[in-house]
Amino acid sequence: MITQSKSPIHILYVDDEERSLHYFRQIFEDEYVIHTAACAADAIKLLEEYAGRIGVLLTDQRMPGESGVELLEKVRRSQPNVVRILVTAYTDYDSAVRAVNDGRAWRYLHKPMDLDQMGQILAEAIATYQEAVGREMVLKQRADELRTSLMADRVSGMSIMAEGLNHHLRNALTVVRAFVDLAPMKLMEEIEGRHPRDPAFWIETQNHATTQIERIQALLTHLAHASHARKLARIDRVNLVDLLTEAQSTYAGHFAEKRLGVSVAIAPEFPELLVHGDRFRQLINLLFIEEVTHLQHGDQIRISAAVDSDAFGEKQACITLVDTGAWGGPQDSAQNLFDPFYTRSRRPDDFGVNMMACYVTMHLHGGTISARRLHPQGLELTLRLPLDPDKNCQEAEQFLRGTLVGDSRANRAIGIAA
């Protein structure tokens, strides 16, 4: 039972010497909740089990299996806020210094440890952890505000969108207008016998006009969906494998025509997702349409999915689509894929309403979608969706971290002490 006098921040000590673990627990368990582990593997399990509660990690350097520095590096990547302390013998002095200089460790201690010094260091480590968590919470709040503002500008700026619509709809409507204007004249010429029948005009031109009308309808449908700037009700439970199989079946003919290869690797433990069923199914279909449209003969597509955690320990589904296609020239940014009126250098007649619809759909699910160009060519799309329908992903976190952390003026502007 945890008493009220104990710190709410837990401490984990890792050492292969059972006697050291016993003494450490005996000395500090009245002040702190103490966890102990005899190896790095056991420590990782405890860190995952008590994520968000263990704030300080002390580890011996020399242990069977992974060393203390290797453990600290893993924790730095998975739970960066945890304060990491390396405990070494004097013979490991160089390793300890490198660990601190490389950012793996907050500080290092020599064995045998001075108990008075240790008590002070633990108190400082707890305070450091609490400051880091507080900073994360402020960043999280600012990220929410910035993300909402960015999406409001993107989704609700319909007047700006109308200007782009004018360009693209005018091009499509020119074809339709030409057919409408020419049809009566061609019909009268054929009726009066002034010119022989012209089946090509009626078949090819009409088909071309019909295609443009369908294109306009699709554009307006996707824009209508994208304009609903409210969070979708995530009440439908779907199986991602089933959705992907359904989409592959729908577009099988197109994939076969271009000889596109598709491979799917979904982690066995990947759960069913709580989503808005119709909109999420449409999102998957739009992604497949984009792939069919832009990939060339023989290109490959790899789709994978797994569960991971964000910077705040929230579980999220991570779906990744990687292809080998050529998506524009060197001047084309991957993030421009989500701009419905960006003119792409390889396909200047195309516009990205499909990808914008995907962007907005993920946003209204509380998730994110991002794009990254690969070298020498290819594209990686990453979709992140919190498993808890009441949670949101924090796509602006890294941006805010880069602009705020270490900048004293920016820190003061949002109330963080420099």
Image: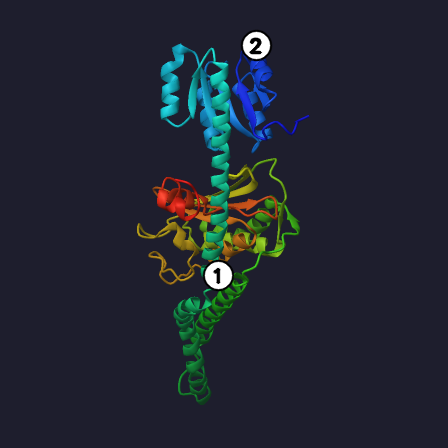
Identify the element where label 1 is drawn.
helix
Which residue is the site of mark 2? 19
The residue under the point 48% across, 70% down is: 213
Above or below, comparing residue 339 to residue 183 in the picture: above
Near-viewer residue (231 or 293)? 231
The residue under the point 53% across, 65% down is: 224
The residue under the point 39% across, 24% down is: 100
Q: Residue furthest left?
A: 330
Residue 386's spot in the image, x, y percent?
57, 45
Near-viewer residue (395 or 51)? 51
The residue under the point 44% across, 26% down is: 73
Is residue 298 visible to us here?
no
Query: Which quadrant is the C terminus positioned in?
Result: top left
Query: Which quadrant is the N terminus positioned in?
Result: top right
Q: Quadrant of residue 3?
A: top right
Q: Residues within 10 Å of mark 2 (few under 14, many from 20)?
A: few
The dot on residue 207 is none
Q: Residue furthest bottom?
A: 192
Name the amino acid type tagged 1.
Val
Q: Cα distance, mark 1 to mark 2?
A: 61 Å
The dot on residue 155 is 1
